[in-house]
Image (cartoon, coloured by chain):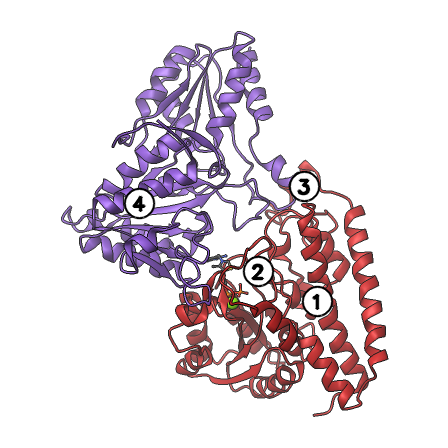
Chain colours: A red, B purple
Amino acid sequence: MQLSRDALLRAYRQMKVIREFEERLHTEIMTGEIAGFTHLYCGQEAVAVGVCEHLDSVDKIISTHRGHGHCIAKGCDVPTMMKEIWGSSEGTCKGKGGSMHIADLDHGMLGANGIVGGGAPIAVGAAMAAKIDGKGKVSIAFSGDGACNQGTTFEAMNMAVVTKAPCIFVFENNHYSEHTGVDYAVGTNLDIASRAEAFGMKVWRGNGVDFFSVHETMREVLEYVRAGNGPAAVEFDTERFFGHFEGDPQRYRGEGELDRIRDERDCLKIFREKVTQAKLLEGADLDAVDADVMSLIEASVEGARAAPRPTAEDVLTDVYISY
Amino acid sequence: MANMMYREAVLRTIFEEMERDENVVMLGEDIVGGMGTAGGPEAIGGIWSTSTGLFGKFGANRVIDTPISESAIIGAANGLALSGKRPIAELMFADFIGVSLDQIWNQMGKFRYMFGGKSKCPAVVRMAYGAGFNAAPQHSQSVHSLLTSMPGLKVVIPSTPADVVGLLRTAIRDDDPVMFLEHKALYATKGEVPDGDYTIPFGHARLTRAGQDVTIVTCGLMVGFCERVADKLAKEGIGCDVIDLRTTSPLDEEAILDSVEVTGRLIVVDESTPRCSIATDIVALVAEKAYSSLKAPSVMVTPPHTPVPFARELESAYLPSTDKIEAAVRKILAWR
Ligand SMILES: Cc1ncc(C[n+]2csc(CCOP(=O)(O)OP(=O)(O)O)c2C)c(N)n1
Ligand SMILES: [Mg+2]
């Protein structure tokens, strides 16, 4: 289905925001200013955006340790996220969670998650709630190829099937869990979707570096799940451009692998090529978005640097609502 | 004597124990690193560098790189141990006991008792614990108090490279399940390690500083903090006993009580959260068994009853520090 000019520009912008957010963090982290562990989503933008462009704020998603992309795609405020990563008291989570735990329940974003496999069961519960509410809303669990090996993921898939919960398991296969290759760690021959299928779900597969492939696939998946057919799963083949975490020497990569994937499997380049060749958008339209995004990121970083810091008293708040 | 880092002490001990006893096996996530990649096995090695080279030496049967499946890792360690092997399972972060808790708590810790003493489960679960890296609530926790509350498990928290070697040897050779907690901030610290095949028995605390005025009981990373405070206060003529518990289960009650009987003042310094903790446990022990020696109420220096926060300012406010420990000593001495 043909997307409107506005929809195309919006999708491109979202992907570009994620890309530049992460590229900027990559350089900022090297200065030592940002604390903690940061896992960058660069390379996988087409998945988060291709999925979330179909959702509204009542649909729920749950993310992983590599969560910035999902957060941005689901509508979290970018400058506020940046403040969180900087540990400011004005950040999305007041500096208590940081990069691995950005959450924004008002936007249906149930949190990035530091526990691999922690998210999928929660997504099932959110889907059960959507089923009870009966408004055709869905819940989406983003998981990596590594997370698909957790028992929690298996339990979640089966429970979603038997309860007919409107839950969608989106597996982002970027071929690595930390330093381990998917063909070692996943027994089903490089294939994750077949696992979900074995649990009794209808499954789809898509190209996770092509926004159009993700978006089209998700249109079908969502139609199916919103119609009350129970859960579904999708596997997207995608790429991670940086290390597992910032500081990873990546000695597990093949010769020239990073150059090759940046060259041939960059979702932003692929998008630009497709829309300009099809004369849907001009290069200049995209350049204007690029410039706009760069200033958003610059302003976000400046804002995060200048933002207020938490104080010792803040440690004690937010453990309970009342105690 | 050899001078080595804490992480080297872990690796060397595992290496030597695997050489000594072919029943010793290791399993965990990314402990080989690079499996199934272009870089090949050992392209990177475990993230803490505590398993480097083991795969090359001992092979895939004994150095088992696992998928991300903590329940099955500990479960498999249980099965290995019940089948005559001596598994060393690695949890990359201590926080991940959450995923594998059934296998630790209901299985490993209970086999021997519920099987009427017929079984042994000689498994070691090594885990990197502790805060100080802004790793936020799910990658920073100190879980020894929680584990100490579980009957059937032994809990070991080495504070120096020499203790790593002696205690890890004991852990691997012990026929009971052992939780072995390695503080992330200690991995790069150095110390002298004695030569020879020495072991350190469980339940024997180490008196690392001696003084007449205050007893400070602690373990793990906090030992160094307490020593620095004791050294500083010694110059003012304030004497502190610093007791490194080494193991919280079994607990060296005698070392604590003997010291408190002399000093009459107890401070417990610990990195785990304060409720139902090793700190409350030791305060209760002293209240119960050395009440008449006490000259002042006991003091606990612990984090507050909250998760570990992310931001630098929050995490440093959260954690015990030398300043907080020093203030506790002055407070207990000033009582009345
Ligand atoms: C329960 C648990 N086990 C292990 C880890 C450490 N860890 C963090 S991310 C990761 C790899 C995850 O791989 P994958 O699911 O493919 O996600 P990706 O990193 O590729 O986005 C591991 C092992 C963790 N955070 N939680
Ligand atoms: Mg992956």
B215 relative to B41, above or below: above
B147 relative to B327, above or below: below
Name the residue located 48 percent from the left edge and 41 percent from the top edge: B184
Residue B22, horizontal then vertical, whole percent: 21, 50
Give yes or no for contact between labels 3 and 2 (Cβ–Cβ under 8 Å).
no
Badge 2 is on which residue? A243
Q: Nearer the viewer, mark 1 or mark 4?
A: 4
Q: Earlier in the sequence, mark 3 or mark 2?
A: 2
For badge 1, the amino acid type reads: Ile
Q: Is mark 2 within 8 Å of ligand 1?
A: no
Chain under label 4?
B
Quadrant of res B1: top left
Mark 4 residue crowding within 10 angstroms, few (<14) / some (14–19) / many (20+): some
Mark number, residue B15:
4
Q: Tell me the quadrant of the picture where the C terminus of chain B can be found.
A: top right
Q: Secondary structure at mark 2?
A: loop
Badge 1 is on which residue? A18
For badge 4, the amino acid type reads: Phe
- B39 vs B322, left or right, is left
Quadrant of res A78: bottom right
Give yes or no for contact between labels 4 and 2 (Cβ–Cβ under 8 Å).
no
C-alpha distance separating marks 4 and 2: 29 Å
Name the residue located 75 percent from the left edge and 57 percent from the top edge: A80
For badge 2, the amino acid type reads: Gly
Mark number, residue A139:
none
Mark 2 residue crowding within 10 angstroms, few (<14) / some (14–19) / many (20+): many
C-alpha distance separating marks 4 and 3: 45 Å
Badge 3 is on which residue? A314
C-alpha distance separating marks 1 and 2: 16 Å
Confirm whether circles 4 and 3 share one chain: no
Identify which residue, A222 or A206, lies in the foreground.
Answer: A206
